[in-house]
Image (cartoon, coloured by chain):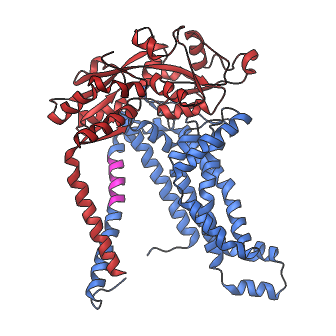
Chain colours: A red, B blue
Amino acid sequence: MQFGLRWLGGAVIVLFLVGCGESGSTLTVTGSSTIAPLMAELAERYETETGIQVDVQSGGSGRGMGDVRQGLADLGMVSRALKADEQDLDGHLIGRDGIAIIVHRDNPVRALNDDQIRAIYTGKMQRWDAGSTEGRPITVVHKAQGRSTQELFLAYFQLENSQVQPDRVIGENQQGIKAVAGDPFAIGYVSIGTAIYEADNGTAIRLLPLEGKPASLAVLAQGGYPLARELNLVTHGEMSQPVADFLAFVTRTDMADVYHDYYFLPAAE
Amino acid sequence: MITTSSLPLSDRLLTLVLRLCGGLAALVLGGIVVVLLVQALPFLINEGAGIWQSTWQPGQGEYGMAPMIAGSLFVSVLALVLAAPVAVLLAAWLRYFAPRLRRPVLAGVELMAGIPSVVYGLWGMLVLVPWINQWVPPGASWLAGSLVLGLMIVPLALLVTDAALGQLPLRYQRAGEALALSRVGMLRRVLLPRAAPGIVGGVVLQFGRALGETMAVLMVCGNVVQWPDSVFAPVRTLTANIALEMAYATGDHRVALFASGLLLIAVTGLLLMASWRLRGVSHG
């Protein structure tokens, strides 16, 4: 027993030392949960090609910027354009995405105009149409504060967060998709990329057009989708060589298929 | 207190290591409290009164936490109300009425206690919430949170109750049998009352666990900051609020979240002390 404990103690110390030694050769990327799955895939490819580990953590665009400023991360993922007061950071455009309004796949509603969406989110319209959806109450799925998806949504519909009357507040895109897929009378909004990816993989959601423009990559590529956004990687101060190398890697033209796999547009398109 | 002078070297080493580990654990806890205090105190002094308001709009400088404090308590209390009777009755039944089933069931229950809470949350989100939704929308609600928490509490409450009953001297049972008491009567009048302090103490400890649970609750409660008007209304707990917003929060918003963490530690500490008192544990 004592013998075992001593070994255990030794093993713990060794693990501790190994853990400390490793941190030098990795890159850390944190931020937007919209970009994170794409970045994780790119990071995996980068590791197979160069052997350099890239640690990707999702936690929202705000966190990405905060981590980069504090030096906790090498790169921050920000799923919108940088604002005027964020010019201390260097933005690097890697792709484009939009925000899609989603409902359950069995919901017969095929389109909602901006005023209707605004009415739903402010609680003025509480039930679906009597004819098509039995007049059931609408479950309004809203995002928690600080998410760039939420900021863009509110800005587009000219709403203040305090005006929104949600039935369910979620954090990540995936939670939003599960919330809508599990509730035939829910409405939510998530990244187009995530939504198309999930819908194509059999998740019970439907993307609604916005102002008559379907939420698709083709429309996004033509610049016709109204609620579009940039996908950025941000850095703070001078870029180190490993960071610059990784940035060059993720924007390489032969990586376009990875972006398409996640239904994003690479910056070049 | 273990005296070390007469022990062999290996034992002395082990004692030293164990003391170091114990000291480290205490130091970490102390560190957490200090960090929370340092971060939250200026905010609490300046805006302490504001946290008892009802409006949580950090974007506009409103940090009312009352509905979330209530949310945490409501969800945990209902979870206990649902789980405690089930756990106590099941433990008593297994011990006195179906002793053959006791071992296999306890083994299964221990396994249940080991399932990570996020798995319960996932089940709640994919099965329980849609099910409640068909019945009373929106589904993600106070009730869903309490059911998931209750399910998480049952195994540990059951084990605690079983242990409390197991510690009763056998003579109670013998005397009861000699007096020809019915088994139900003996359980109700003698055994459960005698074991009550241990059971209640264990259950109070589970209440603390329920208050601190985060991910599972975040996934099923709906997270709307409001006073719930029924068990089917969504609520946001303090823990869910921290998990949802901490990554994005800056400035006062961030400090307000630290303050809510401090509040949680204070409540959990009070519950722990209540549990000690009830179980008659002395840590002198």
The quadrant holding residue A66 is: top left
**Residue A265 visible, this orientation:** yes
Residue A160, image x and y in percent?
48, 19
Q: Residue at x 74, y 20 (%)?
A: A135
The outermost residue toward the bottom is B6
Q: Residue at x 63, y 16 (%)?
A: A124
Q: From what the image shows, is residue A196 above or below residue B257?
A: above
Residue B30 in the magenta stretch? The answer is: yes
Residue A59 appears left or right of B276: left
Q: From what the image shows, is residue A182 above or below residue B176?
A: above
Residue B29 appears left or right of B70: left
Q: From what the image shows, is residue A147 above or below residue B195?
A: above
Q: From what the image shows, is residue A238 above or below residue B176?
A: above
Instruction: Magenta stretch: give its range.
Output: B28-38
Residue B112 in the magenta stretch? The answer is: no
Residue B68, image x and y in percent?
54, 40
**Residue B61 visible, this orientation:** no
Residue A83 appears left or right of A205: left
- In which quadrant will I find the C terminus of chain B? bottom left
Residue A13, image x and y in percent?
26, 65
Number of residue marks = 0
Report the front residue among B36 and B48. B36
- In which quadrant will I find the N terminus of chain B? bottom left
Q: Residue at x 41, y 43 (%)?
A: B259
- By secondary structure, the bulk of the magenta-drawn segment is best described as helix
